[in-house]
Image (cartoon, helix red, strand yellow):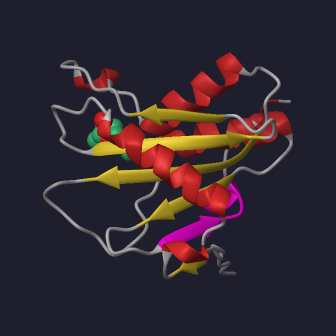
Amino acid sequence: MEKKITVEYEVLDHSDKLTDQEKNLFEIAEKQMELAYAPYSNFYVGAAILLDNGAVIPGSNQENAAYPLCMCAERVALYSAITQYPQGKGVKMAIVANNPHLKVDKPIPPCGSCRQVILEFENRFERPLEILLKDDFGKYYRFKSCRQLLPLAFDGSFLQ
Ligand code: THU
């Protein structure tokens, strides 16, 4: 028996299809991307999370000469958010990236480790975190939950 998994997401062909709140999140993520410390990869990433209390928490990737210590923008933002607002539930996160050497016409996604961490937040706060992505040609992508990006996920339910 073969089973198929469908990934659901919306494609928005212009930024004017975003809500004002989402535009604001992308603006903050872009500003944060400028502050990324990425001298080794030259891959600059910015993220901004909106919490249910209205706070917006930014993050950018932070690299290290010892490469495995590099930390992704998404996790910087998530851990910063939970540290500042222990009860704050994530509502949406915008993620942007810039590779000066390559432009792509597909959503630039969070890595697998970040998806796993986002999923933990969704489970912890019992609410999905919308993921907003973009490509390098002006299109935006809206995923209703990280589960769409991480099907068949491993989570705490296997550890009970
Ligand atoms: N990076 C992120 O910040 N987020 C991701 O989801 C993918 C990768 C960063 C880590 C590293 O600083 C650089 O991008 C290249 O992998």
Q: Which of the pair 148/25 is nearer the observer?
A: 25
Q: Is residue 110 above or below residue 71?
A: below
For the C terminus, the quadrant is top right
Counting from the top left corner in percent of width and height, residue 10 is at: 62, 77
Residue at image coords 62%, 41%: 49
Asked whether residue 118 is drawn in magenta, I would say no
Which residue appears at 70% of the width and 57% of the height?
Answer: 145
Residue 20 on image: x %, y %: 64, 61
**Image spot of residue 8 (x, y percent):** 66, 74
Q: Residue at x 36, y 33 (%)?
A: 61
From what the image shows, is residue 68 above or below residue 130?
above
Magenta segment includes 143: yes
Residue 151 visible here: no
Residue 84 percent across, percent down from the top left: 68, 18
Q: Is residue 31 left or right of residue 126?
A: left
Q: Quadrant of the N terminus?
A: bottom right
Identify the image quadrant of residue 149: bottom right
| Quarter, ligand 1 | top left
* Residue 10 visible from this viewpoint: yes
- Range covered by the magenta-colored residues: 140-150
Left or right position of 124 against 107: right
In the rendered view, would you say 100 is above or below 87?
below
Whether residue 122 sits left or right of residue 143 in the image: it is: right
- Which quarter of the figure has residue 109? bottom left
